[in-house]
Image (cartoon, rainbow, N blue to C red):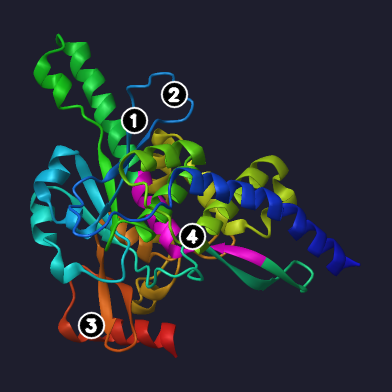
Amino acid sequence: MAADMMAADHHHLFNEQDLESRIELIRKHVARPIPTQPWDDNIPALIPFHEPNDPDISRGVGGIIIGSARHASNISLLQSMNVAAVLNCASGGIARLPVDELKDCGIRYAFTNCRRDSYDYPILHEKKKVANENGASEESYICSQHLEVASELFCDIRCQNNNNSNAQQQRTAKQDTSAETTTTNRPCNILFFCVAGQNRSAALAVATMILHGKPLEECLKHCAEKRPFVLENIGFQRQIVELETILHNLKTKGSAIRNQFQSHWSLFEQANKSSKALQQAKRIRIAEDENGFATKLTSITDRPVSKHVPRSKSEYDVLAGTKVEIELLIPGLCTMEVRIPRECTIPELKQCLIQHANDNLL
């Protein structure tokens, strides 16, 4: 009986007809054939963002730009679009990118190792069997680390835009508005990119926007204007509409389904704070982790999960600047992201990489 009820709840959560209808919406706007080669991919797509519940539409406006590795290498283009950060959504490419030049220009570089552009790759979430309060096994959906990294980076840019807007208001309160002070208050954007700027970067960009409150159809319309060929991957299409359904049900059903989607709920709560609350929460989390966790090498491999599971210190070390993320290439096998101390000896670095490989591959 309990198993039947669980199956019924699962079926009710993901109504296949509803999912197919939303997938058709995606295909109505995007998933078109990529332009015939040779083709100059000069135009990334901007999905603008406006802070929820803020009546002043001029505040916090920024967004996510979907593009390719070519766009990430074009410093003048990034500066013209006021890009404050780039997120590498491919499985490699650091050696081919002007990372040092990005840093010199004040553009933050981040990456999340989306290993494959395939229909079965869990770019947004995956299903796992977990034990419930009664010890019985039940199906749960776990957010991907890719979505966590993307959302955290976007939270940072939201805070930055809010700070810039507040600083501008303080300046204009003290002096007359001039052309100079007006033009310096342009909102910051993030570039999400992969090799072609078609599937991995687009899936994470649209999912991040949905998570932060922007309707799916609005995201698709902006994509269609410049890059109508994005989201061709049918597996990524389904994960996007599943995410949309999960978030809708978390808002309407609340605690009744929270156990199955705890990581989604934690990420949703974080994403939907105001910019001011986001900034305060970030400071608190870093402080709590500094006081509550020892800085062990093994902690670099821990994945931040829900509030019911001890969170890794490593993610907040990256935010605080004490650790950096690098890509580890294991020839013939895979690449993976590793968080290492910003300052360490070669033997310490070697130990970090070996520990990470052992924890994730053995």
Q: Mark 1 or mark 4: which comes first in sequence?
A: 1
Residue extending farthest front: 36
The disc placed on residue 208 is: none
Q: Residues within 10 Å of mark 4 (few under 14, many from 20)?
A: many
In the image, residue 241 above or below residue 362: above
Q: Residue at x 11, y 49 (%)?
A: 75
* CA distance separating discs 2 and 4: 31 Å
Q: Mark 1 or mark 2: which comes first in sequence?
A: 2
Quarter of the view holding residue 220: top left
**Image quarter hosting the N terminus:** bottom right
Three-letter code, disc 2: Asp
Is 301 displayed left or right of 69 in the figure? right
Foreground residue, 312 or 255?
A: 255
Dot 4 and dot 3 residues touching (CB under 8 Å):
no
The disc placed on residue 348 is: 3
Residue 14 appears anywhere in the view: no
Is 58 displayed left or right of 209 in the figure? left
Dot 1 and dot 2 residues touching (CB under 8 Å):
yes
* CA distance separating discs 1 and 2: 9 Å
Task: Report the residue marked by disc 4.
Answer: 236
Q: Residue at x 37, y 43 (%)?
A: 223
In the image, residue 272 above or below residue 162: below
